[in-house]
Amino acid sequence: MTLLQTLNEKAKQIAVRSPWIYRINAGSCNGCDVECATTALIPRYDVERLGCQYCGSPRHADIVLITGPLTARIKDDVLRVFAEVPDPKVTVAVGVCPISGGIFRESYAVHAPVDQYLPVDVNVPGCPPRPQAIIEGIAQAIAIWRERI
Amino acid sequence: MNFLKIFVRNLVNGPSTVSFPFGPAWTPARMRGRIEFKLPSCTGCRACEQVCAPGAIRFDKTPEGLRFMMWHNTCVFCGLCEFYCPTDAIHQSDDWHMAHAVDQKFSMAIRELIPYTNCSACGMKTLASAPNPVGINPPYTPEEIEQHRQLCPACRKKALAERGNPS
């Protein structure tokens, strides 16, 4: 085994411990965003126990949380930001809006479901989902991400 | 000296972080979670379909009967269907473990069928009435209720009119 391969293996072993999370708001009502913030910031829920951390740049992200029904105005921006996230990435749809459109379903102004445009991996239904449900979805996403890396 | 109080309190109570997903999570008693449907109580009045804001509940007429469909991935957990259901056929449980991989999204639904039967008097095709509608107590004997259940709405109306006042 060459040095490069050894380093590569070691990097993978280290990387699976700490996936970074990036949030994309695709026209959400802010309910799911508040729950996502609660999941990360309040010690009662504390998603960082799973090794996750919210990051500010899509280029640093491993797991993408999408909220909102993908409104017509924001669709191109969401697709552009999502394309900047490096592979391998895992996408989690938080709330019923990105999954099916929820209360905005069949509206002319939204392009839900999001999985027509992006490869979604985990769905977390709820309006909004409670923080524990988001943690459950992120835990499933981490399991998928460990297989992909 | 305030920090000493907090220090002792934290020593006694332990960390405030809930251990989920490594342990159980507390669920409030009145948590509005996954919808449950009891087919034996449903009378097919379609009130839930009428009040469902995101359109998660749908009734379809099929050759075999009236099909009830409910999509968990569209439901916003408002609880209106449970509130308006006259026979308690829809119940909102406190189950919130609904995160799933995307390949299971089509299994996140309730599909039930209220079948057609034939009226025992005129032989017309009619919806089978609910065997166990909770919260409804007609003033008839159980034998009479069982007899009326076999009839179509028109024949039932006739039978009730001929019977006269309930005892």
Image: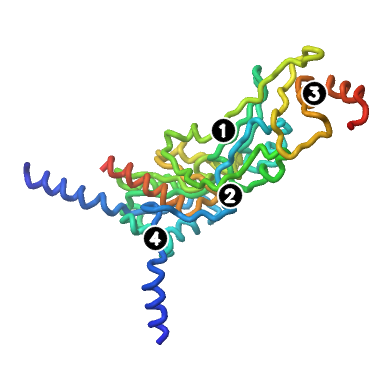
Same chain assignment for discs 1 and 3: yes
Residue positioned most to the bottom: B1
- Residue pointed to by mark 1: B110
| Image mark 3: chain | B
As helix, strand or loop, the secondary structure at mark 2 comes to loop
Same chain assignment for discs 1 and 4: no
Q: Earlier in the sequence, mark 1 or mark 3?
A: 1
Tell me the crowding category of disc 1: few under 14, some 14 to 19, or many 20 or more residues within 10 angstroms, Cα based. Answer: some
Same chain assignment for discs 2 and 1: yes
User: Distance of mark 2 from mark 1, alpha carbons?
Assistant: 17 Å
- Residue B32 shows which numbered tag? 2
Same chain assignment for discs 4 and 2: no
What's the residue type where badge 1 is placed? Ile
Dot 1 and dot 4 residues touching (CB under 8 Å): no
Task: Name the residue: 57% across, 43% down.
Answer: A102
Q: Quadrant of the C terminus of chain B?
A: top right
As helix, strand or loop, the secondary structure at mark 1 comes to strand
- Residue pointed to by mark 4: A46
| Image mark 1: chain | B
| Image mark 2: chain | B
Q: Nearer the viewer, residue A96 or A133?
A: A133
- Residue pointed to by mark 3: B148
Q: Quadrant of the N terminus of chain B?
A: bottom left
In the rendered view, tell whether residue B6 sits above or below residue B109: below
Camera-nearest label, 3 or 2: 3
Which quadrant would residue B53 be assigned to in this image? top right
Camera-nearest label, 4 or 2: 2
Q: Position of residue B126 (x, y in %)?
A: 74, 19
